[in-house]
Image (cartoon, rainbow, N blue to C red):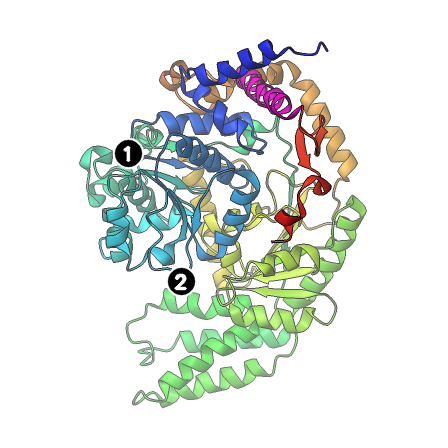
Amino acid sequence: MLRKSKYHIFYETSELINLKYSNSYERLIPTFSSSIMKVYPHQIAETIFALDSKEKGLILGNEAGLGKTFTSMIFVSQNYIEGKKILIVTPTSLIAQWDILMKNNLTLDYSVSTEKEENIFDDNVVLATYEYLNNRFELLEKAKFDIVIFDEAQRLGSFYNEDNKYISKLRESIKDSFKLLLTPLPFEINILKLYGIIKFIDENAFNGMDKDTFFKRYYKREENQKELIEQVNKYCFRTLKSQIKHYVKIPNRVIKMINYDFNKKEEKLYSMIEEYLQLDNKKIFPKMELYDLTLMFTKNLSSSINSFCSMLENVIKRAENIADCDKELSLLNKIYEFSKSINTNNKIKQLEQILRNGFKAIKSAGGYKKAIIFTESKVTQQYLYNILSNKYKVLIFNGDNSKDYSVIEKFKTQYDILIATDVASEGFNLDFCCFVINYDLPYNVLKIEQRISRCHRQGQALDVLVINFFNKNNFYDIRLLELINKRIKQFNNVMGMTDHIIDFSEYMEIKLRTKEEIEQEYNKILDENKKENIKLLDDTETIVRYLFNKEIEEKYTINSAYLKYKNDFVNNAIWELAKLMLKDEKGFKYDEQTRTISILKKSIPKSMYQK
């Protein structure tokens, strides 16, 4: 390569000053130049869509594990360059992870909320928790943020419920801000969650329809489904894993359903429970329907005997203060005493066997001996810890220590098993672990997908093994799977899903692909899609065509090759200028490969570093 003259260097750097960003894609050039993030075409497309949105906000509703956080950081960086005031809101458990990612990937100043600081809203970029905002809504309103980003924003779906004072006050305090909502699925349990989350963005959405009218028009009304999708697409950008697998390496998920049976003592206990539930006029539960009461009893039993005992103990304490319920109380005491006598069960035996088999398969595949076990009960969590800690290095993570991000770091570096409640299902990047066990299955499809996607995500090197426990003789488990299947069908019809979360195939020997096999198959996919991927690098308009209707496709033209050219031009010019300015100075070390200039310590006057 010819050495550049001073004239060439100054000419190129003058071009930096005169760069005119004629469209949104060129607007991103300074962002990429000042960032060390690696981004994918779909993240560029998402960022452009957010930058050009004419609505009052946007739901970034990718399937979990596709880098919504990184997309939002590109969006933050670009708006920071343009002088916007930005607030990022996260759950308490995720603020440390956000802080680390922003420090490692962005070159901008920002403040992080702590419980001690009363007001940090004066700064241009603020990272805060949902909890920190509580009781600070007046300060938040005065701050007048241009943009507010909400991580795990599905919790805002309750905006449809007027009794939720927190969300209503939060919405009022940022009503004029552009809202970017990050959530793996736009709604959780019912269609009103979708209504609520979009109404949080824009009160005029759905043509001003109230929640009752919305529900009547769209709930189980297939003839109106196309209309609903069109309304949602104005506010929602959703990328599926199936749409990017031809250029992003995301290994498979291997799902196994473990159907365990009651042992004889558990069968007797279940019969005793049924006997109690069939009593007429239960005075301990005078207003509770039989269906709901049955779910309560059998759900706790499904989790663990310990969870059931804990629930029943609280019921008995309450019943002791209720008049004329001696017969009920006597039967409940018998059930309680018998349940305490059950020392072992088939579910825990199956878990221990699955851990042995799973760890063996993961080791053969070249992975780490790590598993995350999810349960909905803290009592079950402690029960599992007491048993498994005799054989493995085990950590617990729940609401009590959710602010302590070091637990996640310790799991990554030192421990074999993390036993967690669903506080760990939101947002964490656990791509170092490829073993997910749903010891308890929640009926919320979002929670199941989030649990799995903590490990099954961009950056995961191995196939992810997912184990779901199920008892076909337990009323709660049977009803649970019916609800899950309905929710999956309902959601898939509106927004789409790539992967299964439930699989009823017979459990057999666990076999996972090795890292080498995964890499070979990925390279094969790249070869098979070579033409398409080359076109994608030159023109990521392909992604837009997959995700949006014709109107959106015609509106956007994304050329990532041009972005790369411009980005390289900026960095080359700055590097050449830096070398030129310092070429006659002594005490500097140049590294052409990494493009860094280091100051040699011996060249610094002692008076400077002795202070």
Q: Can residue 481 be seen in this view?
A: no
Q: Which of 511 and 461 is in front in this view?
A: 461
Q: Is residue 295 left or right of residue 96?
A: left
The quarter of the picture where residue 276 lies is bottom left
| Residue 393 visible in the shown view | yes
Q: Is residue 338 left or right of residue 234?
A: right
The label on residue 115 is: 2
- The residue beneath circle 1 is 56
Q: Which of marks 1 and 2 is in front?
A: 2
- Gap in angstroms between the C-alphas marked 1 and 2: 30 Å
Label 1 crowd bin: few (<14), some (14–19), many (20+), radius 10 Å:
some
Is 565 magenta? The answer is yes
Q: Majority secondary structure of the magenta segment?
A: helix
Q: Is mark 2 on a helix, strand or loop?
A: loop
Q: Is mark 1 on a helix, strand or loop?
A: loop
Q: Residue 449 carries which label?
A: none
Horizontal relation, residue 546 to residue 248: left or right:
left
Quadrant of the rendered image containing residue 234: top left
Q: Nearer the viewer, residue 493 or 131?
A: 131
Please state if 397 lies on the left or on the right of 352 as rendered. left
Magenta segment boundaries in residue numbering: 559-583
Amino acid marked by disc 2: Glu
Instruction: Tell me the residue at 78%/53% (across/down).
Output: 360
> Residue 226 placed where, x, y %?
33, 28
Q: Earlier in the sequence, mark 1 or mark 2?
A: 1
Count of marks placed on residues: 2
Q: In the rendered view, would you say 270 is above or below 32? A: below
